[in-house]
């Protein structure tokens, strides 16, 4: 592995064990500035756990996750977010009782302390940011709609939008196109390529067509370990990968 | 700007609701009730402080505390300690073996004022203690629990355990706390006799004003982004966390505010009722406070005030004529509210009464008076 | 505080208090077992659990009054009939409550807590109206009274010994039932994945009801056992409910062995301290320590690290 270069995200020797079972085992990988990286692997390979570890939802047993200069394993979730890492969950995780506008407004990176939240004002800057983001995620017409009424695909977009408005440097998406129609998948792929401009995106996905559409590079995981890494083409022709995953 | 601020804080329908409640508390009740009954209402309204706090922390924040009586009691005890010291001057306690200390200490063979009682001879210290001690205690509990992600039923049970710990402690340490009888026989506040009718009127109004200040502050929180955050947090705590908020701090804040409100209520209770005892600290009052809030509507700060008044009125009426029925009624109230009316009276009002009022107002505007068609329409419904 | 006693006195104090602690442990454990099944396995908070226990105690009281009148010859063994009756009554009431109330409130734990609290108030008042506010005690058959003297200073009361044996018996049956029987597998599978359990043909509603009833039934037996060492009043259940919840939580909610260990720790601590401090301060200290430990280790002392 090349070490001299400055990566955005350095994951080294990452291990987490749940009651003896090592869900992620001595896993290392590196994400470049501005790249779209896709994590694939069979069920239970530890992909979602890697995302959980990076965003602080799960604490690592050993190993290090360095994001620029910050050691993420020592930080709490909100500090990691404020350092510039955004995370989308597998099932759309939005506030169903609030409107689309309020959903985006809450994610806007201002007034995050208790006092800040008390004195937060909905000024032009906030409204503009919400408007812009809503346009990007195809929801500009639904700002006043209660989020619970959106379609499944729209909810996925809204959650992506909630991350975008934070303007993170690393965006992590867990199965962003699960449950989407073919046309929605296409739109999402476009959206991802557009938002990858100026930031890195780390995606966990099963849909191989979608992966081929968006990925700069692909990392294959198996049983908590790295199996193969490289371009989609290279990975697809790797005999180890074919054996455990693509060949089935 | 001030008018704009008011419009933001209290948009038209809510302004009307606030004014209606103000009318009830400051005009209708004082005019219609004699001072004995009004003093009783004043006592009930001190519970309303707690209920309003519970709306914020349980209804909005999803944090059910079964130990709000602790903060009510701490506030009340801080005030009672000051009043007791004032009532125990060496002349009026001359017959004791140690004059100048509270009577119950003398009965328990104490010969000296315990150190933690000493500063309570100052009124300003006592007032600050009323506000700070319970809030600080809530802060410590909050930090310990929320930073470690203890929530939901675990939090409820632990706060309940804390309520029993404090009750046992107060009852057990008779010499320092007055034991099971509490701190009684309180007479004057800075020389002003609080037992006279005129003092009771004044205290009732002060209590009402303080309650409205708390209501306005609660309304400010509801309307701020913090209010929306609390709702968001109740629904999806993880998402709020991954939007970059320290969820624990938000919870600690709202829990402390609820404690602060309760403490003010407790202090006003002591002043209006003239004593404080462990029976207002423990589990039974704590759970009753939750039912006041639940009946009024756990999402409505004004509903909580009405809920408190109505349940207490029912309790007084019931326990005067059928004391054994009251526990049945309260048990049924718990089950009924939770299963059939989770949003309490405020929910019933919103679903059934408000639409009719709106229709009525609209028709009055249209026809310049009550229209017959509307009356027949409502009759048909 | 130890200086007032000689060494041999101290040994016997600790032995006797240790034994008193064991009796307390038995009651805690019997109550906690029922709660551990309902709360640990189903995730339902039953604030009326103490009242189910008291129901068992009152049933025992009734049975103990019936036997001298109708079957005086069998009085010596009335307790075993009483225990069965206590189990059946508490379990039947439990099944009814599950059907009327609890099943509508799954997934709303805080509301369940409030509703069952309401139930506990109603039951308390019902007991008071039926049996009166005074505490009632049962007449024990002769063989349960008295004590065995081990040394001049250490005496072991027989009723305490009996309660302990009973607890061991019931705890091991619960253990076998939950972890060795096919029904136990059903319960645990419903807890872990309800839709899947239902998909493989388990009647999840029936499983819930039986689990809840079983937990209440065990509380009823706890109540029956309780009568041999103390008297019963309408609000006696309230005295134990907080402790019991702390026992279950402290032990790690889903871990029956943890429940046993934590019931042991808490009861021993409390009864040993009780001798040297006043009873109320011993309780304050015990509760305080448990609460502080729970703040430091919210998942309980004996729980496993789970993948969530």
Image (cartoon, rainbow, N blue to C red):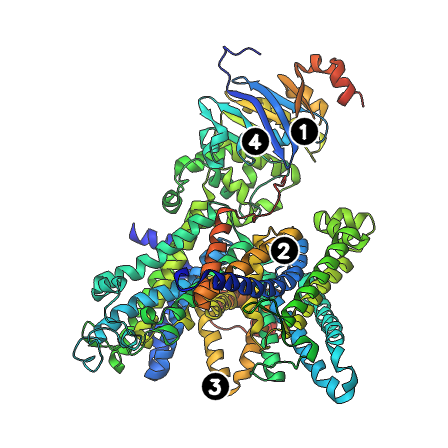
Location of mark 4 (residue): A61
Disc number for residue C13 = none
The answer to whether mark 1 and mark 3 are in CB contact below 8 A is no
The answer for which chain carries disc 2 is C
Location of mark 3 (residue): B320
Q: Nearer the viewer, mark 4 or mark 3?
A: 4
Where's residue A240, x and y in %? 75, 16
Horizontal arrangement in the rendering, residue B369 relative to residue B125 (left or right): right
Determine whether the residue tagged by mark 2 lies in a helix, strand or loop: helix
Q: Nearer the viewer, mark 2 or mark 3?
A: 2
**Residue A177 at least partly seen:** yes
Up the image or down, A32 lies above or below A191; here it is: above
The answer to whether mark 4 and mark 1 are in CB contact below 8 A is no
| Labels 2 and 3 in the same subunit | no
Q: Locate the C terminus of chain B by quadrant.
A: bottom right
The answer for which chain carries disc 1 is A
Determine whether the residue tagged by mark 1 lies in a helix, strand or loop: helix
Q: A196 or B56: nearer the eye?
A: B56
Local packing at callout 2 (Cα closer than 10 Å; few below 14, some 14-19, many 20+) is many
**Residue B55 at least partly seen:** no
Horizontal arrangement in the rendering, residue A70 relative to residue A27 (left or right): left
Residue drawn at x 65%, y 52% is: C257
C-alpha distance separating marks 4 and 1 = 36 Å
C-alpha distance separating marks 4 and 3 = 63 Å
């Amino acid at each position: 592995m090349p070490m001299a270069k400055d990566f955005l995200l350095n994951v080294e020797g990452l291990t987490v064990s749940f009651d003896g079972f090592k869900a992620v085992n001595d896993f290392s990988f590196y994400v470049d500035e501005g790249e779209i990286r896709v994590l694939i692997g069979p069920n239970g390979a530890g992909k979602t756990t890697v995302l959980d570890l990076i965003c602080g939802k799960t604490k690592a047993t050993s190993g290090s996750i360095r994001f620029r200069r910050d050691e993420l394993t020592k930080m709490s979730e909100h500090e990691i977010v404020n350092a510039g890492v955004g995370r989308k969950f597998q099932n759309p995780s939005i506030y169903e009782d609030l409107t689309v506008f309020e959903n985006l407004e809450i994610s806007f990176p201002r007034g995050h302390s208790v006092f800040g939240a008390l004195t937060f004002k909905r000024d032009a800057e906030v409204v503009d940011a919400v408007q812009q983001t809503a346009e990007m995620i195809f929801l500009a017409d639904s700002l006043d709609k209660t989020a619970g009424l959106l379609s499944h695909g729209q909810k996925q977009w809204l959650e992506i939008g909630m991350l975008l408005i934070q303007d993170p440097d690393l965006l992590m998406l867990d199965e962003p196109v699960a449950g989407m129609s073919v046309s929605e998948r296409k739109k999402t792929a476009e959206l991802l390529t557009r938002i990858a401009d100026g930031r890195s995106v780390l995606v966990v996905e099963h849909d191989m067509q979608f992966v081929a559409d968006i990925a700069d590079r692909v990392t294959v995981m198996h049983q908590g370990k790295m199996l193969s890494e490289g371009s989609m083409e290279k990975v697809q022709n790797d005999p180890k990968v074919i054996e455990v995953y693509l060949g089935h | 700007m001030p008018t704009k601020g008011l419009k933001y804080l209290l948009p038209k329908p809510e302004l009307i609701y606030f004014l209606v409640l103000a009318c009830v508390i400051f005009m209708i009740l004082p005019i219609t009730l004699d001072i004995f009954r009004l003093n009783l209402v004043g006592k009930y309204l001190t519970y309303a402080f707690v209920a309003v706090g519970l709306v914020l922390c349980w209804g909005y924040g999803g944090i059910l505390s079964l130990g709000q009586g602790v903060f009510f009691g701490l506030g009340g005890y801080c005030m009672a300690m000051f009043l007791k010291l004032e009532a125990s001057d060496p002349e009026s306690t001359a017959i004791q073996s140690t004059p100048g200390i509270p009577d119950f200490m003398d009965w328990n063979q104490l010969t000296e004022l315990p150190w933690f009682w000493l500063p309570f001879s100052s009124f300003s210290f006592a007032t600050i203690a009323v506000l700070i001690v319970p809030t600080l205690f809530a802060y410590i509990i909050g930090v310990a629990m929320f930073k470690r992600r203890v929530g939901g039923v675990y939090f409820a049970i632990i706060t309940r355990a804390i309520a029993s710990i404090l009750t046992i402690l107060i009852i057990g340490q008779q010499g320092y706390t007055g034991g099971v009888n509490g701190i009684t026989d309180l007479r004057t506040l800075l020389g002003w006799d609080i037992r006279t009718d005129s003092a009771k009127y004044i205290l009732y109004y002060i209590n009402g004003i303080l309650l409205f200040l708390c209501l306005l502050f609660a309304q400010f929180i509801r309307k701020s982004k913090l209010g929306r955050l609390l709702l968001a947090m109740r629904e999806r705590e993880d998402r709020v966390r991954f939007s970059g908020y320290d969820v624990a701090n938000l919870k600690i804040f709202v829990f402390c505010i609820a404690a602060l409100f309760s403490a003010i209520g407790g202090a006003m209770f002591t002043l209006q009722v003239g004593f404080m005892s462990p029976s207002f600290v423990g589990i039974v009052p704590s759970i009753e406070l939750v039912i006041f809030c639940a009946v009024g509507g756990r999402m409505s700060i004004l509903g909580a005030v009405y809920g408190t008044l109505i349940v207490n009125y029912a309790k007084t009426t019931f326990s005067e004529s059928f004391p054994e029925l009251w526990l049945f009624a309260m048990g049924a109230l718990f089950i009924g509210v939770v299963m059939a009316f989770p949003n309490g009276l405020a929910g019933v009002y919103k679903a059934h009464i408000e639409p009719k009022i709106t229709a009525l107002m609209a028709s009055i505007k249209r026809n310049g008076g009550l229209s017959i068609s509307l009356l027949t329409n409502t009759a048909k419904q | 505080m130890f200086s007032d006693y000689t060494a041999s006195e101290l040994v016997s104090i600790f032995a006797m208090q240790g034994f008193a602690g064991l009796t307390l442990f038995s009651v805690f454990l019997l109550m906690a077992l029922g709660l551990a099944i309902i709360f640990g396995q189903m995730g339902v908070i039953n604030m009326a659990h103490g009242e189910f226990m008291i129901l068992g105690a009152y049933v025992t009281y009734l049975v103990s009054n019936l036997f001298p009148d109708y079957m005086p010859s069998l009085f010596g063994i009335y307790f075993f009939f009483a225990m069965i009756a206590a189990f059946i009554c508490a379990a039947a009431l439990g099944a009814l409550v599950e059907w009327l109330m609890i099943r509508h409130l799954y997934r709303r734990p805080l509301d369940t807590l409030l509703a069952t609290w309401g139930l506990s108030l109603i039951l308390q008042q019902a007991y008071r109206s039926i049996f009166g506010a005074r505490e009632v005690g049962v007449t024990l058959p002769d063989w349960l009274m008295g004590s065995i003297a081990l040394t001049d200073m250490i005496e072991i009361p027989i009723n305490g010994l009996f309660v302990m044996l009973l607890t061991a018996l019931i705890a091991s049956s619960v253990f076998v039932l939950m972890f060795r029987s096919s029904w136990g597998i059903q319960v645990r599978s419903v807890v872990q994945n309800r839709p899947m359990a239902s998909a493989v043909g388990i009647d999840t509603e029936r499983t819930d009801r039986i689990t809840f009833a079983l937990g209440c039934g065990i509380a009823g037996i706890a109540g029956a056992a309780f009568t041999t060492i103390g008297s019963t009043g309408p609000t006696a259940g309230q005295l134990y409910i907080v402790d019991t919840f702390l026992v279950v939580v402290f032990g790690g909610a889903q871990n029956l062995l943890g429940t046993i260990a934590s019931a042991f720790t808490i009861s021993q601590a409390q009864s040993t301290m009780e001798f040297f401090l006043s009873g109320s301060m011993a309780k304050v200290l015990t509760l305080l320590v448990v609460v502080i430990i729970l703040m430091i280790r919210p998942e309980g002392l004996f729980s496993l690290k789970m993948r969530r």
